[in-house]
Amino acid sequence: MLLVAEPVLGVEERSAVMDVLESGWLTQGARVREFETAFAECHGVEDAVAVANCTAALHLMLKALGLGPGDEVLVPSLTFAATVNAVLYAGAVPVLVDVESLEAPLMSLEDAESKVTGRTRAVMLMHFAGHMAEKDLWRDFAHRHGIMLIEDAAHAVGGPGAGSYGEAAAFSFYGNKNMTTAEGGMVLMRDPSLLEQARQMRSHGITRSVQQRLVSRSPHYDVGMLGYNYRMDEIRAAIGIVQLSRLEDMAAQRARLVALYQEGLQDLCGQHEGLVVPKPRSGLSAHHIMPIVLPKQIDREDVIARLHDGGVQTTIHYPPVHMLSHYRAQYPSVRLPMTEEFAQRELTLPLHPKMEDSDALLVMELLETALEGILALA
Ligand SMILES: *Cc1c(COP(=O)(O)O)cnc(C)c1O
């Protein structure tokens, strides 16, 4: 079965994990620090804070930025539930914003403009599919309204400009992301003192880590703020350090496959009206996933089944957050027509660095046959 996503793991990761086990120190320590430094360097910043997952990273950055009850945060609904949940954890109010179009399924500037109120404190961009949001446009928007610009950069590890848009960014190393530590996340913040706050909040707000106390031979510590246990461990950090060293290669493979897909699908679009292949308006991408939009009259379940029969897994990104029952109950009146249309017709094709050109060609061949088969029946 050709999977939608698959991590690249080799002998280097295996031996890095073994080294940790043999060292006898498993919890947050020197390797976590090394991973943070390497990740920061790779994203062109001074420092970073590694955490248990991206959801924790989102929560910490919102807390460090001082967002809380009464504050509104503009967020997309075409995202993973974690984006919205983090805002709710902080006690702030998520304001769900529509996407621009089927071709450009990132947050709509126009809809965002219409949803700014006196309580809006931040806008959280999500680089859907790895398609980088238009930086200047959103910086200008945030500046004009006097609000903070933040990134859910879960789709954009290593992406051009990722983490440099505004006040803070959160990254994910979940197993299906551009690089993985199994579970893991990272926080970047423009203000070093806020990054230090996030670092303290990562471990119960404790002023000195277990390692620092060990090194200084003093057991004393204080708790300066309400914190959480959002720590990363040495095993994950060790994997992360190796994965970072592979990131450039993996990104090149992703870019090559996306170019191949774009070329092949362009021909298919010529034959099938209503078939859409989204592209980043910014022209920049981390190539995280390969979404397409099926023609309206095509039964998506049928396409999924036909590709599955051909040995190809596909998936859907995303059921919009406002359509999921928990949020639907809380926000019954939210309607986001473009998000809903996109989500009804979207199909995610396999994209990962282990794929050969022939895999992408097979996917497109099966897709073409499926579309023709379905139309012949209609
Ligand atoms: C994966 C993902 C997250 C959550 O990441 P975790 O590391 O699993 O917590 C958040 N937002 C988006 C857009 C994601 O794709």
Image (cartoon, rainbow, N blue to C red):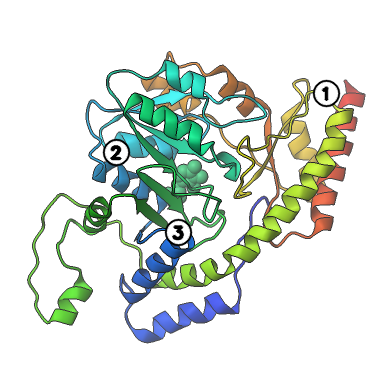
**Secondary element at tag 1:** loop
Task: Please identify the quarter of the rendering in which residue 91 is found.
Answer: top left
Expressed as whole percent of the image width and height from the top left, the position of residue 128 reads 56, 39
Within-10-Å neighbours for mark 1: few <14, some 14–19, many 20+: few
Ligand 1: does it lie within 8 Å of the C-beta at label 2? no
Q: Which residue was labeled with disc 2?
A: 89
N-term mark: 3 or 1:
3
**Secondary element at tag 3:** loop
Q: Which residue was labeled with disc 1?
A: 273
Tell me: residue 152, above or below residue 254. Answer: above
Q: Is residue 66 visible?
A: yes
Q: Residue at x 53, y 67 (%)?
A: 243
Q: Nearer the viewer, residue 202 or 109?
A: 109
Count of marks, rendered view: 3
Q: Which residue was labeled with disc 3?
A: 44
Q: CA gap, disc 2 to disc 3?
A: 29 Å
Q: Residue at x 25, y 50 (%)?
A: 194
Task: Give the mark toward the camera: 2 or 3.
Answer: 3
* Res 201 label: none
What kind of residue is marked 3?
A: Gly
Q: CA gap, disc 2 to disc 1?
A: 43 Å
Q: Nearer the viewer, residue 324 or 285?
A: 285
Q: Is residue 2 visible?
A: no
**Relative to residue 249, is residue 271 drawn left or right?**
right
**Relative to residue 189, is residue 372 drawn left or right?**
right
Give the position of the C terminus as an image quadrant. Answer: top right
Q: Residue at x 52, y 72 (%)?
A: 242
Tell me: residue 100, above or below residue 50. Answer: above
Expressed as whole percent of the image width and height from the top left, the position of residue 336 reads 52, 19
**Relative to residue 344, is residue 166 drawn left or right?**
left
Q: CA gap, disc 3 to disc 1?
A: 42 Å
Task: Give the mark toward the camera: 2 or 1.
Answer: 1
